[in-house]
Amino acid sequence: MEHLDKLEAQSIYILREAYANFKNLCMLWSIGKDSTVMLWLARKAFFGHVPFPLVHIDTHYKIPEMIRFRDQIAHDWGLTMVVGQNEEALAAGMGPGRGRLTCCTALKTRALKQTLDGTGPRYRIQPDGTYAPDPDREPYTGVIVGARGDEEGSRSKERYFSPRTKENDWQLDDQPPELWNQFKTDFAPGTHIRIHPLLDWSEINIWEYIAREGMPITALYFDQGSGRRYRSLGCAPCTGDVASTAEHTRRDH
Amino acid sequence: MAMNLTAFAPTVREQLSLVIVGHVDHGKSTLVGRMLADTGSIDPGRLAKVKAICERQGKRFEYAFLLDALEAEQAQGITIDAARCFFHGERRDYILIDAPGHIEFLKNMLSGAARAEAAILLIDAEEGVQENSRRHGYLLSLLGIRQVVVAVNKMDRMGYDAGVFVGVEREYREFLRQIDVEPAAFIPISALEGGNVVTRSAPMPWYSGPTVLQAMERFAKEPEPADQPLRLPVQDIYKFNRAGDARRIIAGRLTSGTLRAGDEVVFLPSGKRTRVKTIEAFNAATLPDLARAGQSVGVTMTEQIYASRGDVMCHPDQPLKVSNRLRVNLVWLGRAALRAGQVYKLKLGTFSGLCEVERFIEVIDASALRDTGHEDRVERHEVAEVVLRLRDPIACDLSHEFADTGRFVLVDGYDMAGGGIIREVLPAGEKKGPVRWTSEVGTIDRRLRETRQGHRAVVVALHEDLEGTAESLAAAIEESLWTAGRHVFRLRFEAVDLIQPRPGELNLRTACFGRVAALANAGQVVLATVPFAASATQQDVLRLPGLESVPCAQVRFRGDRDDPLDWILDPSHGERELHEEVRRRLDPLLALSS
């Protein structure tokens, strides 16, 4: 098998194991390239369906094009979209002006924790494309995340199925063994499992796969004529673009 | 930094995963760091960053720091977990897995090594063969890794003395011979100085064999098992009717062999036969007509047979073995010992079932290859040969014939506590479940009760779904049956009731199922809502020992089964509609036969 086919087969296996073993399962979708590839893999795994909610943390400062892309794809692919936000912090005036770290902690880390454990607001997409409060406030016990092993040192030590404590902490020095695609699917109440289908993918694999599949990703990654493009996406005030005229992942398009 | 997106050539290079193991402090991380640096595989920025950190912390730079990227590890100077990094050789690319040598982290070493196709085993020339040198060698053979290179490190500290190297080689070769491992090479190296790692070592002219990199490039890639008999463990069965999709798709990944549309296949252990109608695909112009080992696929069948997660699809003339007794070799990692009389969960492929140790044949201290003399337990980090007895039959292979369907893990409580390989499939024992039930002693038996009350006892398990439909549905059925004069009892299991107990804890699971059995034997229609959980839980509810003649049905809101006792309901239906559907199927089961 070709390398990308192997990566794809393993990711699909992991996604199906997650679906078979977790009742309250969700997938984090940042709208970025990695998690969009992961979403595409889910459609492959489940033959065009995505049988769990996609969770997006909206910091309120996201690049507007990201939100447009999210809702368009959600509509086209029939996704169960769930959006979380730290409304309390925003109401109290939280923003990049308070310092990048403070802002990220409140609007990303805190918002994520509240959305996953159900203590914060969740908004679910409606048939007409608008968002309404989600009646489901059960904590998610399985959270599918698009982390790659080559991102930073610590990520290379992740498991495919990685337990998290109540406080979302990763206990690096006491990880369970993971042998032969047998994953940790038994866990104590109150804890949850992070699931990493993209652990073996490199950044280059992601771009190769996007090109091979001809799958949509947000146009922000490509030069729209200004001679600049984004290499990674986040909040508008803090995400830098790079000088590059790349227009597509393939020359022949 | 600008990135040229148009420059991506498709990855055609071969990739081999390689683990580096050995005793703590024998230089594994240093070797990996050295290899990354000397082959130009590392981002110069990362090298500079780690050097800067060392300077700031007032430490001498070590190549090991490239791998031990975490503060926790740098502080202790040992690798805690198995780190992965990518490395470019001349012939192919490598995924290098650096596995910790400290005994406390044996589970991490195994997690790393289980992903590898070949191994480099490091021994410190100064310290010689240590406990973990032997244990890791033994475990590599248990994991089925046959391609091993032994590197004798820190030759610089021993004055590059050939005699030292030869001594270590002689001792360790003898050990490997005892466990049937034939090393591809013994190499004297200095990871610190880079000698015989990527480049030849000038101070060791007496050595003429390959460098570590050369030895790696000589490893053979395991052939893809596509030519072997078909093995397709069933992962799940999909029917996404809510989205208007009528396909009933059996999903799984081929661990071996090739499957073609039109093939006649059999599912084991159930023994159901049918034919493959289509191999499904998403985003493909035409459906593929074959699938090979390694692929994650979905297939539809010509007849709707009852297959479920844990079954394995194969060709009828090349079946797996089916039994409930297995002779195995295993390594134990659990904090509590593996003991006789305790019940564990065995996972093999997608199968999951309960088992216990029937017999301890030999319990070995892997570092000394000595029999520990234990006859009733395997302590943490020990290896053993035992006979396992499962409650239900399993379809499996011998590990030397099929890697994936020949190895398993054991789960104790919430934790994976051991792993092993199947050496022999023994004749099935009598079906004596490890889970024992409260036995009823009354003289008024169920038949008498059923006759007097005018209806049969039935057990209905309702599997919860996301919206809590099962709970309200069960309540509605309870009420309507009661109103109609039926004897009915409703109970709810929580996830915590169904998990495996830890040693010394009360087995709630046995107690809960015992309650269901007692209620059914008292003539009740038992309605039990159960949490959506592992597949073992779902099967448990339907296989209550002693209740063989009581109809046991289950209600689900997902999946697709065509068994008359497995009812798939569409949760988008209204409450009244759901209630009527269940009653329509339940009422005939209540009727007393004449």
Image (spheres, coloured by chain):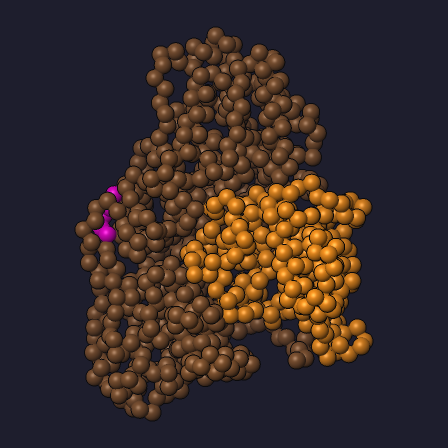
Rendered position, B197 above or below B415: below
**Which colour represents chain A?**
orange
- Give the residue displayed 47% in from the left and 38% down from the top: B496
- Give the residue displayed 44% in from the left and 39% down from the top: B499
- Give the residue displayed 40% in from the left and 77% down from the top: B30
Q: Would residue A250 be counted in the magenta stretch?
A: no
Q: Look at the magenta stretch and give its main secondary structure.
A: strand
* Magenta range: B359-363
Residue A88 seen: yes
Res B153 quadrant in image: bottom left
On-image quarter of the N terminus of chain B: bottom right
The residue nearer to you, when weighing B308 against B354, is B354
- Give the residue displayed 32% in from the left and 38% down from the top: B428
Q: Would residue B361 be counted in the magenta stretch?
A: yes
User: Image check: B586 left or right of B315?
Assistant: right
Res B197 quadrant in image: bottom left
User: Image check: A115 left or right of B323?
Assistant: right
Percent across and percent down for residue B217 are: 42, 77
The residue nearer to you, when weighing A110 against B564, is A110
- How many numbered tags mark residues here? 0
Percent across and percent down for residue B311 are: 47, 43
User: Image check: A92 left or right of A19?
Assistant: right
Judging by colour alone, the chain drawn in brown in this rendered image is B
Percent across and percent down for residue B165 are: 24, 81
Res B124 quadrant in image: bottom left
Rendered position, A89 above or below B489: below
Percent across and percent down for residue B524 are: 49, 18
Extreme-top residue of the structure = B452
